[in-house]
Image: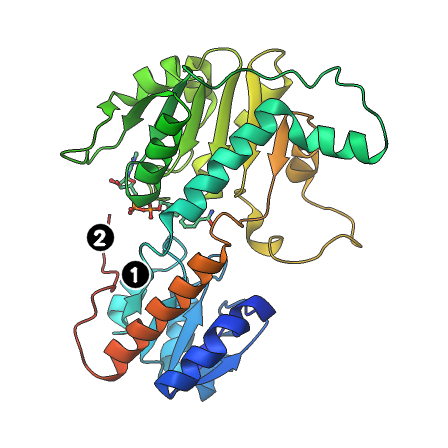
Amino acid sequence: MNIVFFSSKPYDEIWFTPLCKDYGYNPIYLESKLDEHTAPLASEGDAICAFVNDDLSANTIKALSKCNIQGIFMRCAGFNNVDLDACHMYKIPVMRVPGYSPEAVAEFAMGLYLTVNRRIHRAYTRTRDFNMNINGLMGHDIHNKVAGIIGTGKIGQAMINICKGFGMQVIAYDPFPVGNLDVKYTPLDYLFANSDFISLHCPLTEGTKYIINEDSISKMHDGVYIVNTSRGKLIKTDALLNALLTPGKIGGVGLDVYEEESDLYYEDKSNEIMEDEKLARLTTFPNVIITSHQGYFTREAMQSIAIETMENAYALFNNLPLRNQVLRNHQ
Ligand code: NAI
C-alpha cells in the first residue's frame, strides 16, 4: 500500500519511514501542501496523510476521490481543515490521532505564559548583547493568580494540572463539562471577567470561531494574559491588535497559532517581504510571543503520532473497526 504524505518535512520522515517499513507500507513524501491543485499528486497512493495546514475542502476531496484514495490519515488531533460532508459524500473515511501527547501542548502553553510574563524572550536577546539592564522586564507571580481554561478535553485537563502545580486557582468553561474533574466550571463571561490568564484548548468550530473578540476582550480585566495553542481562528486578530494598543489592557499574549498561518507556518520566509501586515504588527509588541504551531513538537508526541497513524492505516487496509474515524457532526 502506498501512503502519500503531504506537507512532509524531514522530521516527519524520521518517524514514519521505519514504521512504514515495519507495517509493509510504502511512504511517498511530498513537500507540497495539499489543496485542490496538488491533490492529483496523490494518484500513486492508496491513502493520503495530511497535516494541520493542508486544505481538505470539498474540491480537494473531490480531486482525491478521482485518484481512488481509500482513506485520509490526519497526523494531528484537529480536523477543522477537513470538509467532512464531502468525505462522507465521496465515501472517504477520515482518521486522526486524537490524543498523542496532551502534555506536550499544555507544557508549551505554560511555557508561553511564563516566558511572556517574565519577559524571558527579551532577557535572552539583551544578555546576548551584554545588556544586563532589567528595566521593563518585571512580571507577576503566577502563584495564586486565576487561570481560566477554555475547553477541558485532553489538553485542557493537562493544563489544569500544570496550573494547579504552580499554585494557581483554576476555573474552566466547557459546554460539555467532564463529570468528575476537580475544577470549578463557570459561565464563559465569568471566566473572561475573573481570569488573570486565559488559555484556549477548545477545537475550532462554527461555535468557537473568534471566541476571543472585541466583546469578550472588553469583559477581561486589565493586564490579562492570553495564550492560544489551539487554532488561530479562535482569536479575532484585529480585536487583539486593538486591545494590545490600549495601554494596560493586555499583560501579554502567547500565540502558537495564528488565524492566517496556513501559507506561512512551517516555512522559512526570512528572506521574503512579510506581506501579512497583522502578523508583522503583532511581532512588534514587546509583550507578544509568536511561535509557529510547535506546541505538539516533542519526541514523544511525534513517535505517538506516527504509531497511531500506522494503526489507523492498518485498520483501514484490513477492514478493522476505525476507532479514530472522524464522522460528520463530530464535536
Ligand atoms: P479534545 O477533543 O480532547 O478537547 C476539546 C474540548 O473542547 C472538549 O472537552 C470539548 O467539549 C471542548 N469544547 C467544544 N466546544 C467548546 C466551546 N464552545 N467552548 C469551550 N470548550 C469547547 O481536544 P484536545 O486534544 O484537548 O485538543 C484541543 C485542541 O488543541 C485541538 O482541537 C487542536 O485545535 C489543538 N491542538 C493544537 C496543537 C498544537 O501543536 N498547537 C496540537 C494538538 C492539538
Give the amino acid at mark 2: Asn
Quadrant in which residue 238 is drawn? top right
Q: Is residue 230 in view from this perspective?
A: no
Q: Amino acid at mark 1?
A: Leu
- Judge whether 87 appears above or below 163 on screen: below
Please state if 117 lies on the left or on the right of 215 as rendered. right
Mark pair 1, 2: CA separation? 8 Å
Residue 252 in the image: x percent, y percent?
57, 24
Label whose residue precedes the other's in the sequence (1 or 2): 1
- Residue receiving disc 2: 329
Residue 199, image x, y percentages: 42, 31
Q: Is residue 216 above or below residue 288?
A: above
Residue at image point 21% right, 28% down = 182
Residue 147 visible from this viewpoint: yes
Q: Quadrant of the N terminus?
A: bottom left
Query: Would you say the residues marked 1 and 2 are in contact, meaning their CB atoms lie under 8 Å apart?
Result: yes
At 77% from the left and 34% from the top, the residue drawn is 125
Q: Is residue 241 above or below residue 40?
A: above
- Which residue in the protein does label 1 denote? 84
